[in-house]
Image (tube, rainbow, N blue to C red):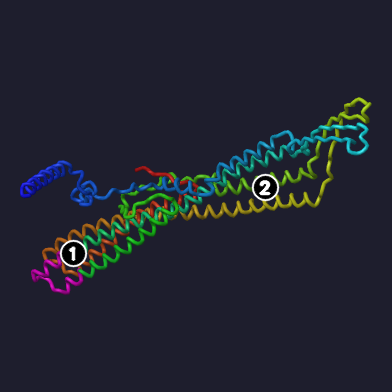
Amino acid sequence: MPRMQRYLYIALAVLGWSFGGAWAQNPASQTTADPVQVPDRAPMPAQGPISTPIPTLSELFAAAWQRQPAARSQQARKDAAAARKEAANSWTAEPIALDISGRTDELSSNLGRREYTAGVAIPLWLPGERSRSIAVAEAEQHATASATLLAQLQTAADVRDAYWTWQLARVGLALTRERLRHAEQLAADVGRRVRAGDMARSDQHQAEGAQAGAEAELAEAAGALAAATQRLRAISGLTLPVDAMAQADTLSAEPTPLPTNGASPSLDAHPALADLRNRAEAARQSSELAQARTRATPELMVATSRERGTFAEQYQQSVTVGLRFPFGSDSRHRASIATAQALAIEAETQLALEHDRIQAALDSARIRVTSASTQRTAAERRAQLARESRAFFEKSFRVGETDLPTRLRIELEATAAERQVARSRIELAAAISALRQALGLLPQQGPQ
């Protein structure tokens, strides 16, 4: 038995050495639960998180428009308008009807009487009805196209408002983080001087209180950015960066639609006015068509018959030509005419009101652009002076020439100036978008 035990120990040692060597030579067989063994799955803070591309205003509008019901039904509406125009261009008012009938006495006397008739009923246009139907179909085609453009403009208004609110929230978060960085630096400087005995403990409390206020503002700015992001994401359906900050000087606004000489473009091509104009034209053409349709559609009937009286007779061929001419109904046609005229009057009246409203909105948008441009120039000058003052007082505070209240006041003034210049730049970009919206122009990406 001792010899058997010795052999057993040797075999176990050999097997252990074999498996240990194979394990060492094949590191892939080790478990992947340990993050040290899979460095490719471990976080890499040095490189930073992969940022989601930030969509432009035009890209957001394109995505939002594809989600709209009007965009998805656009082709079907075009097909319907084209089909109505094709029907109006046909030579008959309604589709031709085929009439086939037969008559026999087989179930009664059975003398051999047979009659077979085949004919067609051709609906005829009333005088002037065909040309006016074509005019109505063309007007409806134009109304369909203008209604689609108006729906695009309405979608653009929602996207523009949500987009610039989102950009303002992004810049606000960036400025708040910058303020927190300065507050932390100030608190560190005060703490160092308190430990050195140059400042009192109350000064450190003031510095730490300013830092806590900056932290609270950061949380508020993060919440505002999250809300603006969700709103824009709901409109466009695109995935937006959750924590995307921006600087206002790097934003690209839409191109200014007006030349510098102050010339005003015409409002005739505005989608809202074009839609009302096309609707009024379609209503007028429908009124004229209703006046032409004084009665129901007459029909021309052409038929051929083959008949015999008895078994001994030969079949005889005959042709029948007839005209079915219904009487008119004055009350029914008066209702159609009055309805079409009412629609035309409403569209024309709304067209005048809408023109005045758009003109007022355009004037207001121009004033807003001018005011925003002036505010941006003044805010940039104030921010430049505030940055220079902050640098001066930072140096003087470090050497003990400036007290803490003055240092805190300068810091607040610099933060307010930076926030004002950032808001003024975004307000100018938003004002240009509002001006383009008032002119009926869709979003367009400006030069980078």
Foreground residue among 206 and 360: 206
Would residue 234 be found to the left or right of residue 305 on screen? left
Quadrant location of the C terminus in the rendered image = top left
The residue depicted at 69 percent of the width and 35 percent of the height is 89
Would residue 168 be found to the left or right of residue 194 on screen? right
Q: Magenta stretch mostly in which secondary structure?
A: helix
Dot label at residue 186: 1
The relative height of residue 112 versus residue 168 in the rendered view (above or below) is above
**Is residue 189 visible in this depiction of the protein?**
yes
The residue depicted at 50 percent of the width and 54 percent of the height is 361
Q: Position of residue 38 (x, y in %)?
A: 21, 47
The answer to which image quadrant residue 243 occupies is: bottom left
- Highlighted magenta segment, given as a residue range: 185-207
Would residue 143 be found to the left or right of residue 258 on screen? right
The alpha-carbon separation of the residues under discs 1 and 2 comes to: 72 Å
Residue closest to the far top: 314
Residue identifier under label 2: 283
Dot label at residue 7: none
Whether the magenta-drawn stretch holds residue 50 is answered as no
Dot 1: what SS?
helix
Dot 2: what SS?
helix
Q: Amino acid at mark 2?
A: Ala
Q: Position of residue 409 (x, y in %)?
A: 23, 67
The answer to which image quadrant residue 285 occupies is: top right
The relative height of residue 113 versus residue 6 in the rendered view (above or below) is above
Q: Position of residue 3 (x, y in %)?
A: 6, 47
Foreground residue among 341 and 353: 341
Q: Amino acid at mark 1?
A: Leu
The residue depicted at 8 percent of the width and 45 percent of the height is 7
Number of callouts in the render? 2
